[in-house]
Amino acid sequence: MIKPKVLVTRRWPAAVEAQLCEKFDVVLNKGDVPLMAHEFRQAFMDFDAVLPTVTDKIGVDALDLSGPRTKLLANYGVGYTHIDMPSAMAHGMTVTNTPDVLSECTADLAMTLMLMAARRAGEGEREIREGRWSGWRPMHLVGTKVSGKTLGIVGFGRIGQEMARRAHHGFGMKIIVHNRSRVAPEVLARYNAVQADDLDDLLPRCDFVSLHCPGGAENRHLINSRRLDLMRPDAFLINTARGEVINEYDLVQALAFETIGGAALDVFDGEPNIAQNLLDSDRLVMLPHLGSATSEAREEMGFRVMNNLQAFFEGQTPPDRVN
Ligand code: DGY
């Protein structure tokens, strides 16, 4: 049997690459750099399946072609707003993602950011490395207690729920949820959570607000100056979702004028480029998009992509089909 021809756009864990190469006719991107639009156009003519990830922008320009050979875009990652879905669907492409397997690790990282921001861990680490630490003193880098506080979770899918589990069961936090659809009462009950129908109603009630909603046009600048003004002056904003969900200019203003307590970001609008005034803010913790960056999650993501490929080429509906 002729093996389907598959392009992997970035380097993956070695164990997954090896299995993939046994089952398919695979071309690996040894350079580990994102492909350009014209390279995608060529790839869509040459391969049966393309396996992109979050940093591969597959916009209208990359899909501006006729009669592509590619019929499957099996994304390595859960978010797929980097793919122009109407264009992909116009070409009859099936799109899949990798849900579930990264939820725990991403929630772990959101907790890390929340704790780092509240306890001023980034500032402390910089102080030691720069040789500025002059010893223990009662009022040195005093932060905010996390246990028992109120956490607002925006987007209550798998990752949002893992965040609630950690915060409620581990830290005794009170949980308020905002989600585009109604959350089943039994799901809310697991975390003793309440649902706020309106985001504007959630924001003033929280000590911490953690974003777990999808990115893309529908949520672009969901958090803007008006909504930042609704947050408490001592509250913290955490983002492990997508950079575009926050208007970064407005966030910089809120941090500079101390209308919020601080923020912690794992994702950025236009990453990996970071606006200078974000870099200049001491009240901000920043990590380079590490949400799912554990060897366990990254392997499982790869095997999940492989399941989708296998199902598709056996003529079945892939388990993680999103369109
Ligand atoms: C995703 O899966 O969408 C992340 O951003 C990368 O793990």
Image: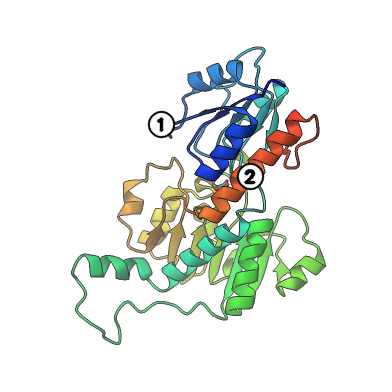
Kind of residue at badge 1: Gly
Kindly identify which residue carries mark 1: 31
Mark 2: secondary structure = helix
- Is 149 positioned to the left or the right of 115 in the image? right
Residue 192, placed above or below residue 300: below
Give the crowd class for mark 2: few <14, some 14-19, many >=20 residues within 10 Å. many
Which quadrant of the view contains residue 181? bottom right
Tell me residue 217's x, y (percent).
Answer: 60, 39
Nearer-N-terminus badge (1/2): 1
Ligand 1 within 8 angstroms of badge 1 C-beta: no
Which residue is rendered at x = 51% and y = 53% of the image? Answer: 295
Tell me residue 150's x, y (percent).
Answer: 59, 74
Residue 209, placed above or below residue 4: below
- Is 206 positioned to the left or the right of 267 in the image? right
Mark 1: secondary structure = loop
Display colour scheme: rainbow
Inter-mark Cα distance, 1 to 2 = 22 Å
Numbered-mark total: 2
Tell me residue 281's x, y (percent).
Answer: 33, 58
Which residue is rendered at x = 69% and y = 20% of the image? Answer: 2
Residue 285 seen from this side = yes
Give the crowd class for mark 1: few <14, some 14-19, many >=20 residues within 10 Å. few
Kind of residue at badge 2: Phe
Image quarter where the C terminus lies is top right
Which residue is rendered at x = 30% and y = 87% of the image? Answer: 138
Residue 141, placed above or below residue 203: below
Kindly identify which residue carries mark 2: 303
